[in-house]
């Protein structure tokens, strides 16, 4: 499988987004913006910058807004053209041109592993990337590209990994294994959301994967685990017993935009990088910290 091109990416976005209620009562969590760009657009752009051609969105009822966002909006774009707002019309059209978007329904939110399995008929028998719809990674070389590079060098499935404090291990899938070289582990053991006293390490897998299609067979054998859901982490544990599975400590900053503080963190970081916003945001922060 060495040098096999990764052309497809699966983006699971069928969850209920309960941590953002009431905002997510009628709007998909993944459409909540980080500044003026919906979080899922950041994710799709990462996949496209990593060479992905087909994006497979795993969605659910009431999530049509995500599909519409990656389509053209003739009414809006024509109206903007007529008003001579060509640059705004181009912003809208450029999202429609980003990539092929194929969507598949997860009829019940049975877990992340189950969501990935829903994409099996479209992925077929080739390696593919998985990017979680609410995990944002800001990196010079896109995180998915970093994992694709490892996949083609090593000829093995690879998950993105980052070190977290011991008191945070219960928020993540955690991996352990033997070092291949700096930043790279051969995975022997994975566990979903362990307690700090049972965690095998402090290496978390936040939401980027490049996987061989054998994962589908493993997910079909995966029993419901943590929270009664079919967990991708448990499917990966089965995969690690069948073939080599690696974990790569990617370069970049990760934001959990599925969490309110994580979203604020990402919004501030992105705003401070925008020349037209940075000064204003600094002033606002100073004002709020002064309490006035
Ligand atoms: P999360 O657990 O963060 O998402 O899953 P959630 O369930 O939507 O959010 P909360 O906890 O209720 O607030 C990570 C990603 O996996 C997708 C979610 O849409 C999210 O992007 N997911 C999760 C599915 O597609 N299907 C599922 O059954 C579960």
Image (cartoon, rainbow, N blue to C red):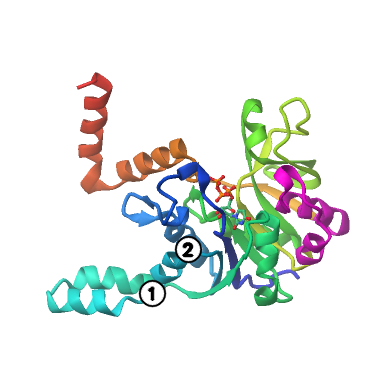
Residue at left offset 70%, top offset 43% = 227
- For label 1, the crowd category at 10 Å Cα-Cα, with few meaning under 14, some 14 to 19 and many 20 or more, is some
- Above or below residue 215? Residue 161 is above
Residue in the foreground of this view, choosing between 235 and 209: 235
The CB of the residue at mark 1 lies under 8 Å from ligand 1: no
- Residue 19 pos. (x, y %): 50, 42
- Residue 130 pos. (x, y %): 62, 60
- Residue 215 pos. (x, y %): 76, 63
Residue in the foreground of this view, choosing between 256 and 66: 66
Residue at left offset 48%, top offset 64% = 49
The CB of the residue at mark 2 lies under 8 Å from ligand 1: no
Residue in the foreground of this view, choosing between 184 and 208: 208
Q: Marks 1 and 2, Cα distance to the nearest angstrom? A: 20 Å
- Residue 264 pos. (x, y %): 39, 38
Taking 127 as reference, is 279 left or right? left
User: Outermost residue toward the right?
Assistant: 241
Q: How many marks?
A: 2
| Residue 62 disc label | 2
Residue at left offset 32%, top offset 74% = 93
Residue at left offset 65%, top offset 69% = 119
Instruction: Please say whether residue 254 is visible from this viewpoint.
Output: no
């Amino acid at each position: 499988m060495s040098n096999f091109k990764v052309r497809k990416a699966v983006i699971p976005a069928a969850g209920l987004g309960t941590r953002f209620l009431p905002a997510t009562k009628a709007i998909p969590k993944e459409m909540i913006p980080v500044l003026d760009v919906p979080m899922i657009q950041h994710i799709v752009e990462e996949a496209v910058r990593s060479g992905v051609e087909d994006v497979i969105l795993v969605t659910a009822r009431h999530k049509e807004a995500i599909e519409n966002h990656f389509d053209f909006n003739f009414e809006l774009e024509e109206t903007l053209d007529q008003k001579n707002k060509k640059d705004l019309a181009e912003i809208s059209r450029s999202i429609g041109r980003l990539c092929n978007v194929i969507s598949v329904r997860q009829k019940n939110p049975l877990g992340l592993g189950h969501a990935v399995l829903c994409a099996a008929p479209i992925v077929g028998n080739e390696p593919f990337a998985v990017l979680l719809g609410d995990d944002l990674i800001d990196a010079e070389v896109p995180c998915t590209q970093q994992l694709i590079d490892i996949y083609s060098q090593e000829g093995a499935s690879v998950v993105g990994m980052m070190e977290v404090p011991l008191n945070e291990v219960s928020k993540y899938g955690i991996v352990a294994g033997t070092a291949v070289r700096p930043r790279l582990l051969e995975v022997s053991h994975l566990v979903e959301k362990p307690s700090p006293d049972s965690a095998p390490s402090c290496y978390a897998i936040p939401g980027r994967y490049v996987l061989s299609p054998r994962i589908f067979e493993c997910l079909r054998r995966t029993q419901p685990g943590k929270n009664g859901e079919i967990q991708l982490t448990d499917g990966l544990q089965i995969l690690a017993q069948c073939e080599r599975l690696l974990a790569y400590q990617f370069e970049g900053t990760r934001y959990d935009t599925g969490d309110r503080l994580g979203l604020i963190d990402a919004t501030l970081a992105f705003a401070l990088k925008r020349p037209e916003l940075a000064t204003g945001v600094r002033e606002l922060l100073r004002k709020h910290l002064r309490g006035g």
